[in-house]
Amino acid sequence: MATFRMFSGVQPVTRDSAIRDALAGFQLAALNIPQALGYTKIAGTPVITGLYTLLFPLVAFAAFGSSRFLVVAADSATAAILASGLGDLAPLASARYVALAGTVALLTGGFLLIARLLKLGFLADFLSQTVLVGFLTGVGFQVGIAVLGELLGVEVHTQRSIGQLLEVARGLPQVRMITPLISLVVVAVILGLHRLTPRVPGALIAVAGAIAASRLWDLAGRGVAVVGPVVGGLPRLGLPAMTWHDISQLVPIAGSCVVMIVAQSAATARFYATRHSQRLDENADLIGLSAANAAAALSGTFVVDGSPTQTAMVESSGGQSQLAQIATAAVVAAVLLFLTEPLQYLPRCALGAIVFVIAVRLVDLGGLRDIQRESPAEFALALLTAAAVVLVGVEQAIILAMVLSLLRVLNHSYHPQTGVLVEGEQGLWETKPAVAGTVTEPGLVIYRFGAAVFYANAGLFAHQVRTLARASGVRWLVVDAEAITNVDYSAARMLRDLNQYLKQINVEFSFARTAPSLRADLIRHRIIQAIGEQRIFPRLHNAIAAFKMSQGS
């Protein structure tokens, strides 16, 4: 059993590694601060709360997590889930809204801790890559639509994407060109600098330029909406104001956040641990994610998640441990203490432009093309998930994404690969369709079933075995059980009935290559007792030899 160590994602620390990670942390802060401000537009919280996500949550994960690279801070997916769930409960950016957001973060932290205690980290594997690509693409479209009003200077009041598009369309005649022009310049600067010099913090340069232009030319006086006064200083620590009624309303939102956090964080942490040949303790990461969300709640901000984009940022900046994230938190603390005053001049459309760029990067057209090329059916699932995000809502779509992923697993088990093994050239086995008349050799059928046998696919198993056994001349039917890990109660009853049927038509029923788990099930359900121990073979060649001996050859 792995022993738990605090700051395991930091140790060991050397002078050279500390300098390298500190420099990476400063660069990560420069890249991340504008994005964190942008995420507040998605989450619906005050601008300052974006900086709070880069403070105590980063330190909490560094203290309790295992991954050396994972950046746990604000993320577009969980921010969108939060806004979708809270939009009807309180006015955006109000004190009540912030308290509800903090409560969601606290509940999320609690659920993540329970997940650790129950060792539920495996749940991340039930959100397939297919629907995850579709979900994040849908979030990209939803977020992009949500900030169109901000980009153009049009007031939008509805929370639904279609309604937002209609409100923007109705408001187009009243648009003043200065606002969309600023938005266009900010987007061009961010994308242009990223294309030319990816290491340069384009978003930070765009934000600094927008603030300078706003102050120099009094853009607020020219009708451009600005952020306004921002309260600086470190956040006050304390529990968010909440009631039992609030908690009952927010549990589903927190549950949706947990699903996304576990899936996205685990996938990201595994990827970077594998790339750098590092040890990863996923259970410790669940504790770290729980601590980070508890820290977010106590410091007055919203749900945090393991972010793939921000983790890529820290790696590209040269960081190789959580010390880089701690350095980022130190930079953010300095900004909160000394540099929040200029934020009041930041045009809201510039903030919206940053969010729009984030949304564009979430739309994974390359991933969708790959899915379409390799699996059209899964491509349809990805599109359905993306459409659900835009048309129904983020919270409902994450549930749909999990259901679709589980249905794909069940579909593979319900329709497993089956067939009759036939010896081909050079003694290699080939699989032929399990249709009447197909035999391994005269008088013998070796039937392969490619999944565990359970109540849903037991009918298919029985139908194909009966069809093969009724063919003229068949005397033995051997089940190649290499892929059958277990049988449930319903399937066991089917096997016993099938054995009786085969006896009636004078066909010997046998199993070969049974795994220990399957053998235990066959004993428990008294199937071996019915078939006979002598009809359970360790290898296919043993079964074939026994068949030939029984035929006197």
Image (cartoon, rainbow, N blue to C red):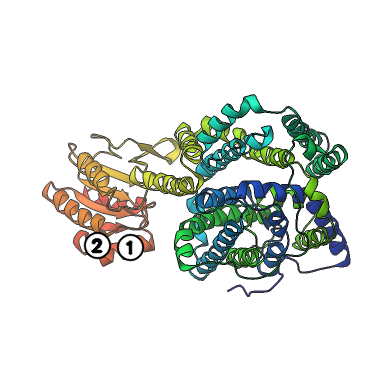
Q: Position of residue 453 (x, y in %)?
A: 31, 52
Q: Secondary structure at mark 1?
A: helix
Q: Check the image and report above or below for 233 versus 466.
A: below
Q: Position of residue 452 (x, y in %)?
A: 35, 53
Q: Which of the two discs, 2 and 1, labels the residue nearer the N terminus?
A: 1
In the rendered structure, the answer to whether residue 234 lies left or right of residue 283 reads right
Instruction: Give the labeled residue for mark 1.
Output: 519
Residue at the left extreme, as displayed? 504
Number of disc labels: 2
In the rendered structure, the answer to whether residue 462 lies left or right of residue 482 reads left
Q: Check the image and report above or below for 354 versus 108.
A: above
Q: Position of residue 230 (x, y in %)?
A: 75, 54
Tell me where residue 418 sits by quadrant: top left
Q: Spatial distance from mark 2 to mark 1, Cα to Cα?
A: 8 Å
User: Looking at the image, can residue 200 be seen?
Assistant: no
Q: Check the image and report above or below for 247 versus 340.
A: below
Q: Secondary structure at mark 2?
A: helix
Graded by Cα atoms within 10 Å as few (under 14), some (14 to 19) or many (20 or more), the crowding at tag 2 reads many
Residue located 59% across and 31% down the image: 168
Do callouts 2 and 1 mark residues in contact (Cβ within 8 Å)?
A: yes
Residue 343 is tagged as none
Front position in the image: 525 or 239: 239
User: Looking at the image, can residue 417 be seen?
Assistant: yes
Tell me the kind of residue under disc 2: Ile
Tell me where residue 432 sits by quadrant: top left
Residue located 76% across and 30% down the image: 178
Q: Position of residue 440 (x, y in %)?
A: 30, 40
Instruction: Give the labeled residue for mark 2.
Output: 528
For the N terminus, the quadrant is bottom right
Front position in the image: 269 or 48: 48
Tell me the kind of residue under disc 1: Arg
